[in-house]
């Protein structure tokens, strides 16, 4: 009888541990936020950057970036890049293939910003970029 009680106890224990592990590993469907704030960021994190800058600070810009700018600190940083000027630009953001960085101030390293992957927001920012790019004028060659 003692042997039978031990075996039944072991079986009940194994089944109980199995249920506990299963419940502990069960994922809850917690939806991740589509946006998050950031103080530290790098433009190198963004693939195929498209930049809309009401004001562009002095920073290293990737060669493959497309830029629409209103004001800038240093025109030499645009050398060899696709840059257009547009005096009606309002706002500062960097678009990538799958996300955007919206900045609270000028586009410069470590400016306070918000990363977003929200589909509707990305679509609106892309439309704004494309519209601004179409309406902008090419930066004169001697200025590049």
Image (spheres, rainbow, N blue to C red):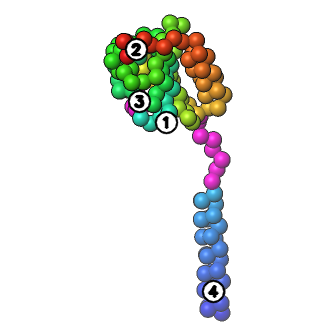
In-image side of 98 versus 144 (left or right): right
Residue pictured at 46% horizontal, 22% vertical: 82
Mostly what secondary structure, the magenta segment?
A: loop
Front disc: 4 or 3? 3
**Left or right of 8 in this view: 104:** left
First of labels 4, 3 by sequence position: 4
How far apart marks 2 and 1 lie (CA) works out to: 26 Å
Q: Secondary structure at mark 4?
A: helix
Q: Disc 1 designates what residue?
A: 47
In the foreground, 5 or 65 = 65
Task: Identify the magenta region.
Answer: 27-43
Residue 103 visible in the current orientation: no
- Marks 1 and 3, the one that precedes in the sequence: 1
Sooner in the amino-acid sequence: mark 1 or mark 4: 4
The residue tagged 4 is 7
Q: Position of residue 114 (x, y in %)?
A: 50, 27
């Amino acid at each position: 009888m003692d042997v039978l009680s031990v075996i039944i106890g072991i079986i009940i224990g194994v089944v109980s541990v199995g249920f506990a592990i299963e419940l502990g590993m069960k994922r809850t469907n917690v939806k991740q936020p589509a946006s998050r704030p950031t103080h530290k960021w790098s433009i190198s994190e963004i693939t195929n950057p498209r930049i809309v800058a009401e004001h562009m600070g002095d920073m290293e810009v990737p060669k493959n970036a497309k830029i629409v700018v209103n004001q800038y600190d240093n025109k030499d940083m645009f050398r060899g890049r696709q840059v257009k000027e547009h005096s009606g630009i309002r706002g500062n953001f960097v678009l990538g293939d799958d996300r955007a960085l919206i900045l609270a101030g000028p586009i410069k390293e470590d400016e306070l910003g918000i990363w977003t992957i929200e589909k509707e927001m990305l679509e609106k920012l892309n439309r704004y970029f494309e519209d601004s790019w179409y309406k902008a004028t090419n930066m004169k060659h001697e200025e590049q």
